[in-house]
């Protein structure tokens, strides 16, 4: 069963993208920033990383989930 992007958000400037990924009954989060991909994150990790980067989650905007992620299939695990 292939993972599927269920939902995606990005910063207003489009520099950072956050995806909610689901495969079967397993769900996790992915942050994509330029060529950096952090995969298999919990929501707590996403909140912490965005906070450390000075990104307010309230500023994220919804984007189409079907858009391919940069470097799809070449993800580092955080």
Image (tube, rainbow, N blue to C red):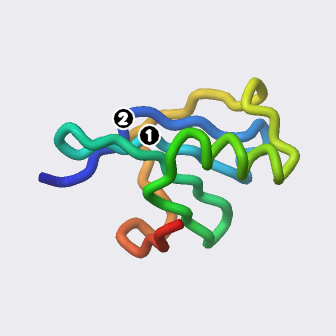
Q: Nearer the viewer, residue 71 or 29?
A: 29
List x then y, in percent, for residue 53. Answer: 83, 52
**Residue ID for mark 1:** 20
**Residue ID for mark 2:** 6
Q: Indicate left or right for 76 with 48 as reference.
A: left
Q: Is residue 69 above or below residue 24?
A: below
Q: Is residue 15 above or below residue 25?
A: below
Disc 1 crowd, CA 10 A, few/some/many (<14, 14-19, 20+):
many
Q: Indicate left or right for 1 with 29 as reference.
A: left
Image point (44%, 40%), residue name: 20
Q: Nearer the viewer, residue 46 or 1?
A: 46
Image point (67%, 66%), residue name: 34
Number of labels in the image equals 2
Residue 58: which disc?
none
Residue 31 occupies quadrant = bottom right
State the separation of the CA atoms marked 2 and 1.
Answer: 6 Å
Residue 18 occupies quadrant = top right
List x then y, in percent, for residue 66. Answer: 38, 41
Of the numbered discs 2 and 1, the one sitting upstream in the chain is: 2
List x then y, in percent, for residue 55. Answer: 81, 42
* Residue farthest right in this picture: 54
Image point (66%, 28%), residue name: 61
- Disc 2 vs disc 1: Cβ atoms closer than 8 Å? yes
Q: Indicate left or right for 44 with 48 as reference.
A: left
List x then y, in percent, for residue 71. Answer: 47, 70
Q: Secondary structure at mark 1?
A: strand
Disc 2 crowd, CA 10 A, few/some/many (<14, 14-19, 20+):
some
Residue 65 occupies quadrant = top left
């Amino acid at each position: 069963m292939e993972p599927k992007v269920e939902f995606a958000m990005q910063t207003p400037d489009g520099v950072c993208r956050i995806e909610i990924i689901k495969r079967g009954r397993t769900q996790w989060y992915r942050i994509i920033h330029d060529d950096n991909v952090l995969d298999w994150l919990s929501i707590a990790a996403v909140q912490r990383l965005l906070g450390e980067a000075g990104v307010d989650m309230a500023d994220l905007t919804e984007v189409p989930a079907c858009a391919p992620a940069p470097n799809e299939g070449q993800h580092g695990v955080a």
